[in-house]
Amino acid sequence: MAASVDLKTAPPSPNESASTLSLAVDRVLPRVAMFDSKKFRIASSVTFVASVALLILGISVLIGWAFDIGILKRLAPGLVSMKPNTAVCFILSGASLWLLKAEGVSGAKLRLGQALAAIVIVIGALTIIEYFSGANLRLDQLLFTEAKSPSVLFPGRMAFATALNFVVLGSALVFINEKSKGKNLTDVLAGSGAALTLLALLSYLYKVDALYRVVPFATIALHTIIGLLILCAGILFARAKDGFVAVFLSDTSGGIVARRLLPVAILIPPMLGWFRLMGERRGFYEPAFGIAIVATSLIILLVAVIGRTARVLDSAEVVRRRADDRTRLVVEATPSAIVMVNEQGRIALVNSQTERLFGYSRSELLDQPIEKLVPDRYASLHADHRGSFLREPTTRAMGAGRDLYGLRKDGSEVPIEIGLNPLRTDEGNFVLADIIDITKRKETEATLRQSEERAQRGKRIWEKTFDAIGEGILVHDSEMRIVRCNAQAAEMLNMKPAEVIGRKFADAFALLFGKQAADYYLDEGREVLSSFEAQTAAGQRYMVSIFPIKNPDGESVSVVMWNDVTTLAEVQEQLGRSRRLASVGQLAAGVAHEVNNPLAAITTCAEAVMRDINHSETAKELAESRQWNYYLGEIVRQSLRCKEITRGLLDLTRQRQARRVLIDINSLVKECAKIGVQRTDSKAEFQMHLDENIGEVATDAEMLRQILDNLIANAIDALNEQPGTVAVSTIREGDRIGIEIADSGQGIPTDLLSRIFDPFFSTKGPGKGYGLGLAICLSLAESLGGSITVETKESKGSRFRVWIPRRAPD
């Protein structure tokens, strides 16, 4: 961790820092016993074996009394027997120890174990009362009857020392799981019972009757002594973690020394006493000299033990110091700042990284409140949080919680991240804080966040741009499944973008252009074209372009664009038509003068011959017999037709200038419709739907009349002399006016729809038109600044709409 801090105080020297840290480490590092879990398992096993042994011992003795088995009652002839009440107390004590041996036992198990221990106390106490009062409470021979003999003053009654031991050890069992007031009482009681029992054991070993002198009315059986020692051991080992035995099981120097001295303390004094006693009894020396021998032996032994122990402690101290040195090196070498805080919230340990991070020297921080390193706005809250953490200490990893800040000596704040580890020591609870400076990380995160925001902003812009593109765009993967779709493509498919994504591209293509087109263009057996034109069922034409793209990860995708080229195609067709009209115009202009004069001469001559024939009866009869009048009339009619064709061509190609004046559109439409109604051969039913709000519009009345006359005549002809309807309507749409002429005829075939405005093209039969009417209408509409649109359905009729703009008069 690198932190640039301008220190206002000179940093301490390395020696001073090491010395200060050493003192801090010595003060706060845990000095409680470090226990081996294996030793605790052994201790737990000792308690379990002790409880089982007591149960077996008590049951065996009761069996011996029940079946008069001497070896079970007294182990060997001549020894004192164990009384039935003693056996019962061992059974109750063993059961109680087994129930209470587990740490933290509670509930019914705890209450039952304590109840069994209480019964042991009651039996022992009642026996003591019998000894002191001289009364017989009929407790001694309650289970079995023991015969009276001179050596037994009280048949069936346990020894006074045994009863006292059961009172003491039963009380120890009651308090065995106590963690506060009775924490040390159990060890004291168990130790007292062990001392009293050990005295009885040594009396057996030394073959003395001291107990008879102290308590002359009973002795303790040998296996009773063994049982009491087992019970004492079981109670002491049940508190192996926090009791008297804990120090003997620890891996500290004290534990090592205790384990080394314990055998010496237990075995050597009894052995020296036995040797002294044997020497005195055999007359080797006087009692005073025996005491001198024992004292000298103890001095030599203790000196040897002290020397050996000193060497052990010296070695342990060397090891501890090396461990402390390693600990200091680890703390100092840690790249993060280390701060240890005690229960009072005061700093107990810091390392050099802490000095560099916060700008304080070590001496300025030790024993100071931790809030010294907390910004003022967080100080009060920090104290509360610290208290709650110490009440329920748990390890908190780095990065847990909200953003944290530390306060430097110069008053600046630094973003930090803290990991917390609670420590329990013999001096109390501590919290070890591992602190790292995350200034650079915050800067990097801010930069990364800005980059992500820019990327997201760019993505949003790209998505909006993608959706705003007027062409439909799809992206499909190598499995031909759509993975991206813009709004225009979805609208063309009459779906939402989310509904399109995931579909097969072939299904979407078929939905727009039909299954036949999809099978043709997307057939797996043929090479897919990169660009082609397709047409929808409604007649819209699209240019479809496919661009294969390979992603950086190697996956291939394809971008498909379809652009509506219907308008472009119409413009191209209109341009072609204009070019054809220009050619026709050039032809008409050149031919009109060359053709009209001969046609006029032919017409004049034919009409003159017809007049001459009508003036002579002979010629008239001859003409009738030879049908000369028909032939001459046909010559005149065809000549006039040729003149009409040339005049139509001239009208079609002549660029007429519209003279816009205000006219009532509805009145003009009514006049044109009235003329159509008056056609004698018409069976059409006329329907009028006029928008009365249109009013007057500035346009050329003659041009518009010519357009309407032609379209109404075509609508009547489309009925093919059959009954039907011709509907004439006016509509207003924005800044333009529409005049609609619809018929209920057979309609125009779809494949011919694109050619109806071409010159000399007609859907009527022979002799029913020159194929110039619609071409002239379109030319006139364009001169008015408008257009003509057509909709048709076979067997349903056609609908032509003339659109003219609303303009001011010229």
Image (tube, rainbow, N blue to C red):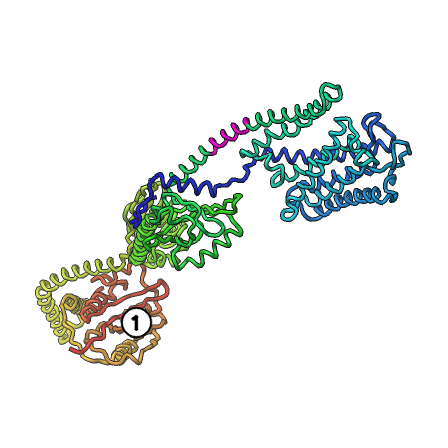
Q: Position of residue 798 (x, y in %)?
A: 32, 66
| Left or right: 220, with 300 as reference point | right
Q: As rendered, which of 223 and 785 lies closer to the eye?
A: 223
As displayed, is residue 25 above or below residue 67?
A: below
Query: Does the rendering let one see residue 625?
Result: no
Q: Which residue is mark 1?
A: 741
Q: Is residue 770 left or right of residue 185?
A: left
Q: Residue at x 23, y 63 (%)?
A: 757
Determine if the magenta segment contains residue 312. yes
Residue 272 position by quadrant: top right
Question: Left or right of 801: which side holds 516?
Answer: right
Q: Find the magenta span and give its range.
A: 307-320
Dividing the picture into quadrants, the one containing residue 186 is top right
Q: Quadrant of the N terminus?
A: top left
**The magenta stretch spans residue 332:** no
Residues 72 and 199: in front is: 199
The secondary structure type at the circle numbered 1 is strand
Compared to residue 641, the image places residue 23 above or below, namely: above
Residue 611 is drawn in which quadrant? Answer: bottom left
Question: Residue 455: percent from the left, percent from the top?
Answer: 31, 52
Q: Identify residue type, mark 1.
A: Ile
Q: Quadrant of the C terminus?
A: bottom left
